[in-house]
Amino acid sequence: MRHKVKKKHFDRTKEQRLALYRSLARALILEERIETSLQRAKVVKAFAERLITLGKRGDLHARRLALELLPDKKAVRKLFEEVAPRFENRQGGYTRLIKLPDRRKGDGCELAILELVE
């Protein structure tokens, strides 16, 4: 039974899961649109929205917290200078999740597109 299990583990250790979240969030910020499995997209959506909220704060402490969660200076710079100012007047819902009708050919996994809202 899944009592008190609040997140997907993806059959990975904590460090591997964090690396997965960081790499997908980095790709989302730099490319502004990624295609991945539906389950991964749902988890990374929350992670990315938290980063964008930090970017909207814009102070030094928020930048250091973002660098702790996403240790890529190029991605954090784009997050604070380009992505976050676009969502200045928005109270949440910075990303859009679109389910794709086709499944992945190799394992039949449901696919989704995760993109930043314009």
Image (tube, rainbow, N blue to C red):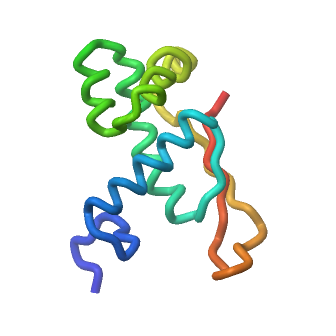
Along the line of sight, which residue is nearer the eye, 85 or 22? 22
Query: In the image, 101: left or right of 108?
Result: right
Number of labels in the image equals: 0
**Quadrant position of the C terminus in the picture:** top right
What residue appears at the point 35 percent right and 61 percent down from the top-left corner?
17
Query: In the image, 7: left or right of 25?
Result: left
Q: In the picture, residue 51 is in which quadrant?
A: top left
Say if 110 sits above or below 19 in the image.
below
What residue appears at the point 70 percent right and 73 percent down from the top-left corner?
104
Picture coordinates of residue 15 (x, y %)?
A: 27, 59
Picture coordinates of residue 90 (x, y %)?
A: 51, 23
Query: In the image, 34: left or right of 48?
Result: right
Along the line of sight, which residue is nearer the eye, 20 or 62? 20
Query: In the image, 92: left or right of 66?
Result: right
What residue appears at the point 72 percent right and 73 percent down from the top-left corner?
103
What residue appears at the point 74 percent right and 78 percent down from the top-left corner?
105
Picture coordinates of residue 39 (x, y %)?
A: 51, 65
Along the line of sight, which residue is nearer the eye, 34 or 2? 34
